[in-house]
Amino acid sequence: MGHDILLARHGNHISSMRVDRANDRVIATLDDGSWDSAPNRISPLLQMPDSFGSFLRDDWRIFTVAAIAMLTIGAIAMSLAMGVASTMPTEELNALLVSYPAF
């Protein structure tokens, strides 16, 4: 972790790096003789990206409402289509069904 931080800060101006295990840090010596250090541990306070499971666990209500709404809209559309088809004469319905793949 600390190597990545130091590379992001200084890029190719780093001449050497070492790990200070006692203090859990990475120390870099720069080209001009100065040095910089960065922690070699991820902070427990850092907000990590959510996993797919935690995403579903937190937002299941939204997904449930969206699924029910889409199913309701689909059921209404299907019932309207069946209602319109049942009011058509057989000849018009056959002509519509035959010409449908052309669109």
Image (cartoon, grey):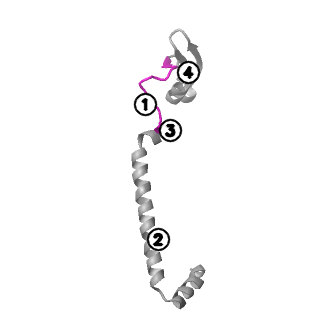
Distance (Cα) linking label 1 and label 2? 45 Å
Q: Quadrant of residue 31?
A: top right
Q: In this view, does 66 lie above or below 38?
A: below
Distance (Cα) linking label 3 and label 1? 16 Å
Q: Does dot 3 land on a helix, a strand or a loop?
A: helix
Q: Disc 3 residue type?
A: Gly
Q: Upstream in the sequence, badge 2 or badge 4?
A: 4
Q: Is residue 93 above or below residue 2?
A: below
Tell us which disc is closer to us: 1 or 4: 1
Magenta-span inclusion, residue 46: yes
Tag 1 and tag 2, C-beta contact below 8 Å: no
Residue at 44 percent across and 78 percent down: it is: 83
Q: Disc 4 residue type?
A: Asp
Q: Upstream in the sequence, badge 1 or badge 4?
A: 4
Residue underneath mark 3 = 53
Residue underneath mark 2 = 78
Closest to the observer: 38 or 78?
78
Task: Give, as a single range, the part of the protein colored magenta.
Answer: 35-54
Distance (Cα) linking label 3 and label 2? 33 Å
Where is residue 33? Give x, y as percent.
Answer: 53, 16
Distance (Cα) linking label 1 and label 4? 34 Å
Residue underneath mark 1 = 47
Q: Disc 2 residue type?
A: Met
